Image (cartoon, grey):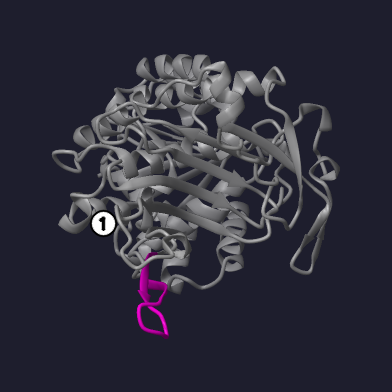
Amino acid sequence: MIDRLAIVGATGDLTARYLLPGLAALYAAGQLGDDFELVCTDRKDWDTDTYRSWAGAQLDRLGSTWPEHARKQVVSAARFQQCDITDVAAVKALVGGTAPLAVYLALPPAVFAPAVSTLERAVLPSGSRIVLEKPFGEDLDSAVRLNRLLAEVVPEEAVFRVDHFLAMSTVENILGSRLANRVLEVIWNSANIAAVDIVWDERLTLEDRAGYYDGTGALKDMLQNHLLQILCLVAMEPPVSLGERDLRDRKMDMLRSIRPFTDADVAQRSRRARYLAGRIGDRTVPAYVDENGVDPTRRTETFAEIELELDNWRWAGTPFRLRTGKALGRDRMEVAVRFRDVPHMPFGHAGEILPNVLRFGLVPETLSLDLIGNGPQAFSFAPLRLAAQMPPPDLPPYGRLLQEVLTGNAALSIRGDEAEQAWRVVEPVLAAWDEGRVPLEEYPAGSDGPAPRRRPDPD
C-alpha cells in the first residue's frame, strides 16, 4: 500500500467536497495510519498552516459524518507546497525522494496533458501511480494522445482513470443482483427484457459551474462516462471473476458491441435540449443562457438522451436509453429494467396491466420490483411494488476510490482502451450536434424535460 498522496489542485471544489471527506472516511475506518503523508499543492501562495485551516473549515462545512479524530488526522497529515504543475523543478521538489506516491490530478481535463508531460520530465519514483478524473480527454484524438503520454510515465496498471459512479454501492449492487441470483441470471437477456433506461435527472441547475460545464455539456459530462459505465455493468457478459483484468475485459467487449450511429440514427436516436426560465419547487430559476458565465453562442445542452443498440447474442432487439438533464422537476437517478409482457393474458384487459420493472435506485440507494397484485375485486389487478432500502456502505464513493488507488486495485478504474472506445460510441452524436443536424430543443426549468416525441402512426 502506498502511504504518500499528492493532490494537485488541492484548493479546488473536488478536493473540498470529495477528496478531504474521502480521506476522513478512511481514517475513521482505520484504513490510514500515522505515517500517511498528504502533500497538497496549488499555485496559491499559501503555507501549511493556512491550508490546514482551510481544510478544517471545509470538513466542518460538510457536517459531522465522521468522528472528530478523523477530521483532525486529515488536517494534521496535510502539508502544503506551492507548485505550478507545468514547472519541472517545482514538481521534482513535490515528488522528491525514492518512496512511491500517488499523484491525484484534481484539475480541469484540459490541464491533464501538460501535467502528465511535466510528471514525465520530473521522473516519478518507481511504483508511483497517477489518478485522473473524468472526462478523460475532450474527444477521441485527445484521449489517444493522453494515453500515449501516460504510457511514457507509468505502466497501464498504475493509471487510475477514476469514475466515482463505479464506487457507488448501488451500482455495484447491479452486478450482485444479476450475477449472484439465479432467478435473475436466467432471464437477463432480450428474450425477457424489453428495454433498459439509465437515467440521471436532477433538480440541480448550473450551480456556478459555468467555467467547466459550458464548455462540456450534458453528453460529455454524464453520458460519455458515468452512464456508459453503468451500461457496462448492466449489459456485459458475466466475468470469470471481479478481478481487474476479467471485469475490464468484459466491459470492453460490451462497449465494442454497441452498434455505431449512422447519420439517420443520430437524428432518430439522440436528443439535446437546454432549460429555459422556470420554477423548481420554491426557487425561481433563470434560463441557462442567462446563468452567470454562460456563452449562449456555444449552444451547450443541459439535457442529453441517446438510444443504443447492442449487436450481440444476449441483447439484440433490446434498446438501452441513456438520459440526463439538469433543472428538471424531480430527481430521478435509477436504472429501470422493463420486462416484456407475458405471452398470453388469460384475465382480459391486458392493456391495463403495467409491465414488470426492476429498478436500481442510485440516489437514494434502493432496489424495487414493480409487479401485478390482486385488486379489491375477484380477478381484478393492481400495481404492487416490492421495495428495499440498501444498507449504507462502509465508505463513501471517494473513500472507496482513494482506498483502491492507495492499495493498487485498478478494478474500479477505467482502462485506456475502454476510455477510447467510449469516445468512439458518442463521437458521431457529437459531430452531428456540432453541425446542427439535431435541433437544440428547450424545456422550462422544473418540467419533465423536452416534450416527448410523437411516434409515427402505424401503417
Q: How would you rate the neighbour count of disc 1 (Cα within 10 Å): few for under 14, some for 14-19, many for 20 or more? A: some
What residue type is disc 1 on?
A: Ser
For mark 1, give the secondary structure: helix
Q: Residue at x 31, y 64 (%)?
A: 346
Which residue is the extreme one toward the bottom? 376
Q: Position of residue 37 (x, y in %)?
A: 39, 48
Q: Quadrant of residue 55?
A: bottom right
Foreground pick, 369 / 69: 369
Q: Quadrant of residue 354?
A: bottom left
Q: Is residue 382 magenta?
A: yes
Q: Position of residue 227 (x, y in %)?
A: 47, 41
Q: Is residue 119 above or below residue 28?
A: above
Count of numbered badges drawn on the protein: 1
Residue 39 in the figure: left or right of residue 434 = left
Q: Is residue 195 above or below residue 383?
A: above
Magenta stretch bounds: 367-388
Q: What is the magenta segment's predominant secondary structure? A: strand
Residue 106 in the figure: left or right of residue 278 = left
Residue ID for mark 1: 177
Q: Position of residue 231 (x, y in %)?
A: 39, 40
Residue 324 in the figure: left or right of residue 301 = left
